[in-house]
Amino acid sequence: MYSFMGGGLFCAGVGNILLIVSTATDYWMQYRHSNNFMHQGLWRYCMPGKCFTHTDSIAYWDATRAFMILSLLACFFGIILGIMAFIHYSSFDRFDKTFAAGILFFISCFFVFLAMAVYTGVTINYYGKRYGTWRFSWSYIIGWVSVVLTFFSGSFYMCAYRMHECPRISNPH
């Protein structure tokens, strides 16, 4: 049980760091415009030597930002509950922290998956038709890695929950 929880905490910790880095950095996409290489993230776009804040409220950027922030929050609270379950902190006796942490990690996975899917779909449809030379960059790739890590975090915590629940079910005393 503790090895699953430890693995879940490790994946969640790394996943949360990657979520922060992915959300905050400006390398979601790189493209060529007017013979200059440019890159953009969720908050800014950059030309050679200068970056500018996105001033337009474009729905897919807003949705991607919101889903990434919700994912960060769910993962963070999942880590807190996961640590409390790991050290047997018992302020809520009727509340299974292992199960709740697993659910929060799956919710985080779902939100980051939505963010990545929205960004991917709109970017391919928009930039794929307008620019010949563009590509997704490392901030974007880190976002997809965090989808996998938050999924494994939830899976590890659900396995730990099942291992913890099975002895209670088979032995009612």
Image (tube, rainbow, N blue to C red):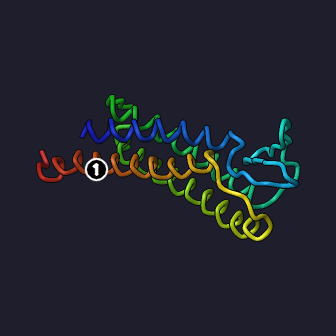
Residue for point 68% across, 49% down: 28
Given residues 94 and 61, the one toward you in this image is 61
In x, y percent, where is residue 75?
51, 43
Q: Residue at x 55, y 58 (%)?
A: 113
Mark 1 highlights which residue? 159
Q: Quadrant of the N terminus?
A: top left
Give left or right: position of 106 versus 43: left
* Along the viewing direction, whichever of 21 and 161 lies nearer the viewer: 21
Q: Is residue 40 above or below residue 50?
A: below
State the residue at coordinates (40%, 46%). Answer: 153
**Residue 103 in the figure: left or right of residue 132:** left
Q: x and y percent of residue 48 in the render? A: 83, 40
Q: Amino acid at mark 1?
A: Cys
Front-most of 101 and 65? 65
Depth check, front residue: 27 or 168: 27
> Residue 52, image x and y in percent?
86, 41
In the displayed structure, does residue 77 sit left or right of residue 136? left
Q: Residues within 10 Å of mark 1 (few under 14, many from 20)?
A: some
Residue extending farthest to the front is 35
Residue 171 % position (x, y): 11, 48
Q: Quadrant of the C terminus?
A: top left
Q: Residue at x 59, y 60 (%)?
A: 114
Quadrant of residue 9 within the rendered picture: top left
